[in-house]
Image (cartoon, rainbow, N blue to C red):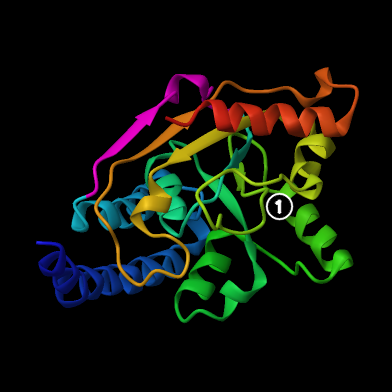
Amino acid sequence: MKYVYYVYQYLIAWPTLLVLTIFTALFTIIFVPFRNAEFVHKEQQFWSRSFFWLMFLPVTIEGKEHIKKGQSYVFVANHQSMFDVWLIYGWLPVVFKWLMKAELRKVPFVGTACKAAGHIFVERRNAKAAMESLKNVEKQLSNGVCTVIFPEGTRSLNGEVGKFKRGAFQIAWDLGLPVIPLSLDGCYEVLPKGNPFVHRHAVSMHIGEPIDLKQYADANEAIEAVRDAVIAGRK
């Protein structure tokens, strides 16, 4: 059955997802004046959830009650695989802007659609450009619009939560926004870094309680507190 599942992925699931990706990209580009509208967000959610439906992956979401409508947050998540992106995009019940590595700008359709949606590309090798990117996303964070950050900077090689980089928290400090930890589990087992095949496995996202970074006198202490909360929320 494992090999039948692999064949299904490449003959049915991935071609279908490619068509959905192109449609969603065009939809996002066409409706760029309404990029924060609920109907645009819902279509993008449908696209993201399709990755799990077509791959027969069960999803569990906990902690939605911790999100207050109309409040902007900085969501901080661990990073296990590409499925993290679709899990968050599909089930996080807020309009948000990603901080994305600049290389994704070159992906056909996707790069243009991400720019149209208001996501921010970060030049990680250029400190000045990276700071400009932070300022650009900060301008959008009001009236419930949020941002999502992977503070590890890259996908985990073993599924464990790595060290959090300080720069990822700058937006929360600059704007005084609460941080909500997102604990993702199972995505590493679904698609480890460098693996060409999806493996069936349950995935989950735990939305933690908001954390006010101002309660910590030391920046490193605040970052470790958020990292501990992300780890604690995993199954």
Specify whether 171 is left or right of 158.
Answer: right
Q: Which quadrant: the N terminus?
A: bottom left
Specify whether 2 is left or right of 76.
Answer: left
- Where residue 144 appears, x then y in whole percent? 58, 34
Residue visible at 51% across and 43% down in the picture: 95
- Where residue 66 appears, x then y in whole percent? 51, 20
Residue type marked 1: Val
Residue visible at 28% across and 42% down in the picture: 202
Specify whether 20 is left or right of 157.
Answer: left
Specify whether 203 is left or right of 116.
Answer: left
Highlighted magenta segment, given as a residue range:
57-70
Q: Disc 1 designates what residue?
A: 137
Q: Nearer the viewer, residue 103 or 142?
A: 103
- 80 vs 212: above or below: below
- 91 vs 61: above or below: below
- Where residue 217 appears, x then y in whole percent? 90, 22
Is-magenta flag for residue 65? yes
Q: Nearer the viewer, residue 123 or 41?
A: 123
**Please, what secondary structure does the residue beneath circle 1 have?**
helix
